[in-house]
Amino acid sequence: MKKKNIFYIALLALGFSTVGCSDSFLDMAQDGVYDRLDTETKATWYINALYELMYKGFNTPNKTIVYQSTSFDNLTEEAWGISAKTNPGTTYYTITELGNTSFMSSYFGTSLAAGKKSPASGYHQIRYCNNLLEELDNNASSFNKDYIKKAKGQAYFLRAAQMFDLVRIYGPVPIVTTVLNAEASDTGLPRSSVTQCVEQIVKDLNTAAEMLPDYWSGDDYGRVTRGAALALKSRVLLTYASPIFNRNWNNPDNIRWKKALKAAQDAQAAMPDKGLDGISSAKEWENMLCKSSNTEDNKETIFLRLNHQGKESGATYNGWEQSARLTSQGGSGGIKVPIELIDKFPNADGTLVKEADKLANGNMHFMENRDPRFYRTFAFNGMIWGYKELPNDTVWAYRWIKSLVPDENAETPNTYLATYGYSEENNVPSPVFIRKMTNIQAAKEEFEYSGINVYEYRYAELALNLAECYAATGQVELCKQELGKLRARVGIPKGNQNYGLDSYINSRESAIAGCLHERLIELAYEGKRYWDIWRWLLYDGGQGYCGNGERMYLSDENTCEILGLTPLIGTCRTSRYIDVKSELYIPGNNDDNLTADPLLNARETVGADPDSPDFQKELKKVAEFWEQNFQLKEPPTPGDKDSNNNPVLLSWKSNYYISGINNTALTKNPWLGQTIGWGDTNGSPGTINFQDDEVLSVD
């Protein structure tokens, strides 16, 4: 859809009246009763408003939750930012307190004041979808059959999408398929098991797939399609088969893996016009990720959030470009990258980087001979990363000591405090910064209000779903075939090691780990990494401790040990400044500051353009420049730190995987029950289990 249509009107404009408070299931009726949706115009406005409400938060590609402007990057290798305040795992809370500190607890729902008209939780979005379905039935004579079919298909998809995120956050949740009245009840609406929730989600997506078209055109481009419904079903069933919900995950014959495999295959079959063959080089891969046309489709698109260039009233835009661009380019200063992620990108032949060659171990030639996606995901000192006004802009982000001032408070004599100069005023405490999903054709004035569309789901993810299902069901060679397709299209040669995959994938377990690694590379900064870590229990292998100090076994076997992966718990995301080697100049003092950039002349002939046919030669020169002129220095404060700037290790309790229900909801609806690992309003341990051995009855 064109931006002006999909985001033209909000739900409030439909004019609804309010009702009084009561002890109800999440006060869901307090939003009022809507005007009748008895014309196509009203119904279309309503549907457009649903898209607006549910996906407005996806204003950058790293957002993860329907209806929330939420990113979990700082819980992954993609970013840092954990502190003692935001990482409650640094304190052992009592079981009572756990009910108050539940991760994402408000997303489930909180009470609304009388007359308040703004949505408050995921269940409000479900209510809006249910209202649409009922109104379409009640006013069926006002619409033609084709309109009703497509409108219902969108409602079923959006309801399923919201329900899925509620399950990912809370596990078992109540299933709501009608517009409920606000009524006090001793029994309420109990939480259904995860299997029952997934069954309802799959039913909705199957129904949506039967009703939705394969394509939308013109002003309707951007609405969900039949393929999008089946692709979301693949994501849902992959999650359902993963260790977070499936204790029998290590069985290749497990029915959940087989259903997930079939769902991925069916989704691909439903989209013959989609695929990976639309991309045949890393440059095309990069360009595909920064599409800004609201009418141009491509083979990668399954579902996206449309954006519109500009800040006029009601416009939706992508804030990523402004964040990613350096200060020297007119941006906000760049998005820094932990060294741990830099070192995980493969070599040019697809093999994994050896320990001695990692940047973490001081290798200043780390940027040579890497996966072609490396140069489209990151930028670094000496790389050409342009924009409209300066298409050949060579970026520099290093620092040098301008002056040394005696530290009068130091206990050790001859101690000095340094002040620094920064190249091009770029103060970036990281050897590399993000380039991915930026537009080298964009003008400076377009950075802040970018029209680049945000992929919520692209075909590469579906291909990775299929590969993982092949791996989990023991079909290792088929898994490698799917991964090889992703690597071939960006220019990794097949060689004698099958795109490098044969060097580290030789079993079911290593194939699963290989899929997770490929997802980390292909989908970096697209809001997917947290969910992969979460569903595979990679913080602690699923055998960690709850917040009260008790052991909590979410998996019979430690997933990290089985897959050969290092748990994230106890690790710290690290970074370094790139400093000019001190022996290349003599810092000044208060009277003689060295303010000039000491490398300004030396760097004039250095620059590597990933679009150049001589890129590898240029890159070698850049690496040599790094070796001759730069050294790695610790930032003045760590990325993960407490209030005293002391490093904080990533801490995670097993109960964090599935959030508890907030106390407000429990007080109003005690029949909901609390999730295991969390405390209820009386301080008693929760009893609701989010893992079950039920069998899904739908395909």
Image: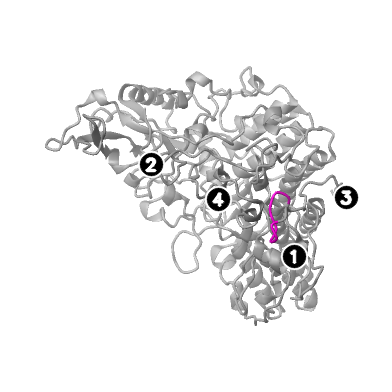
**Residue bearing mark 2:** 386
Of label 1 and label 3, which has the lower sequence position? Answer: 1
Return the mark for residue 71.
4
Q: What range is drawn magenta here?
A: 676-683
- Tell me the mark number nearer the camera, choosing from 1 and 4: 1
Q: CA distance from mark 4 to mark 3?
A: 34 Å
Residue 681 within the magenta-colored segment of the rendering: yes
- Residue 60 seen: yes
- Tell me the mark number nearer the camera, choosing from 2 and 4: 4
Q: Circle 3: is it few (<14), some (14-19), or many (20+) Cα within 10 Å?
A: few
What percent of the width, then of the height, locates residue 236? 73, 48
Q: Quadrant of residue 115?
A: bottom right
Give the left or right position of residue 582, taking residue 251 as reference. left
Q: Circle 2: is it few (<14), some (14-19), or many (20+) Cα within 10 Å?
A: many
Q: CA distance from mark 2 to mark 4?
A: 27 Å
Q: Answer yes or no: do the residues labelled 1 and 4 have beta carbons within 8 Å?
A: no
State the SS at label 1.
Answer: helix
**Residue bearing mark 3:** 697
**Residue bearing mark 1:** 670
Q: CA distance from mark 1 to mark 4?
A: 30 Å
State the SS at label 2.
Answer: loop
Mark 4: amino acid: Ser
Mark 2: amino acid: Gly
Residue 149 within the magenta-colored segment of the rendering: no
Q: Answer yes or no: do the residues labelled 2 and 1 have beta carbons within 8 Å?
A: no
Of label 4 and label 3, which has the lower sequence position? Answer: 4
Q: Circle 1: is it few (<14), some (14-19), or many (20+) Cα within 10 Å?
A: some
